[in-house]
Image (spheres, rainbow, N blue to C red):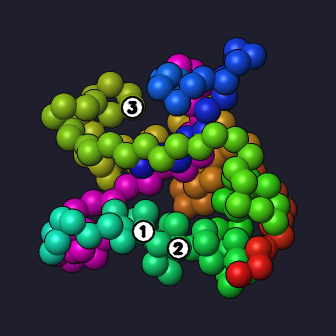
């Protein structure tokens, strides 16, 4: 599930109905949410969906609770913690809720029989995630916000990140 920002080479930004060109999409974060966790039980990330498909509080790791990406980002932006300081610093203008660039959340169901891995052979999700992170880190080292799986000298780990928190 990457967060991707659009970079447009043209002088005119695209309208909402226009699709970005693949070369214009820069991955900011790649992650996976598997249906079954380490104990081979339905992952807590999917329990809410399995219980009631009409619930909207979360999807995979993208919910607004304290242990979900959006919730952690909100907590950082409001000064309650700094778990997503790199995200807030890189994605938002400091002290505001204004994104620095147009940003999209792209989610794709993974089927190893349908989608080949990044190197052209079938790969399970657990195999594909670190390969995709490595490719994105290699292609966009100053843009990628993945901390886990990134090398020790990756900008996300070595750069100072600052974000002026918002008043609640």
Q: Residues within 10 Å of mark 1 (few under 14, many from 20)?
A: some
The magenta-colored residue range is 21-49
Neighbours of disc 2 within 10 Å: few (<14), some (14-19), many (20+) = some
Residue behind mark 1: 63
Identify the residue at image location x=52%, y=66%.
70
- Look at 68% across and 84% down and name the residue there: 80
Inter-mark Cα distance, 2 to 3: 30 Å
Q: Which residue is mark 2?
A: 71
Q: Residue at x 28, y 30 (%)?
A: 116
Residue 162: percent from left, percent from top: 83, 65
As for residue 58 lying within the magenta part, the answer is no
State the SS at label 2: helix
Q: Residue at x 60, y 23 (%)?
A: 14
Label 3 neighbour load within 10 Å: few <14, some 14-19, many 20+:
some
Chain-order first, disc 1 or disc 2: 1
Marks 1/2: CA distance?
6 Å
The residue that label 3 is drawn on is 118
Q: Position of residue 140 (x, y in %)?
A: 66, 36
Front-lying residue, 52 or 134: 52
x and y percentages locating residue 113 in the rendered image: 16, 34
Could you tell me residue 68's position as x and y percent?
46, 72
């Amino acid at each position: 599930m990457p967060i991707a920002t659009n970079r447009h080479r043209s002088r005119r930004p695209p309208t909402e109905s226009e699709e970005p060109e693949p070369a214009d999409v820069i991955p900011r974060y790649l992650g996976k949410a598997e249906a079954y966790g380490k104990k081979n039980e339905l992952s807590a990330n999917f329990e809410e969906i399995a219980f009631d498909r009409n619930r909207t509080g979360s999807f995979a790791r993208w919910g607004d609770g304290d242990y979900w990406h959006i919730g952690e980002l909100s907590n950082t932006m409001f000064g309650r913690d700094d778990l997503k300081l790199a995200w807030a610093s890189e994605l938002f203008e400091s002290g505001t809720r204004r994104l620095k660039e147009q940003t999209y959340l792209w989610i794709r169901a993974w089927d190893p029989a349908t989608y080949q891995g990044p190197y052209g052979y079938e790969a399970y999700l657990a195999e594909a995630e670190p390969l995709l992170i490595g490719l994105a880190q290699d292609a966009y080292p100053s843009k990628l916000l993945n901390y886990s799986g990134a090398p020790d000298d990756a900008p996300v780990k070595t750069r100072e990140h600052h974000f002026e928190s918002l008043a609640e």
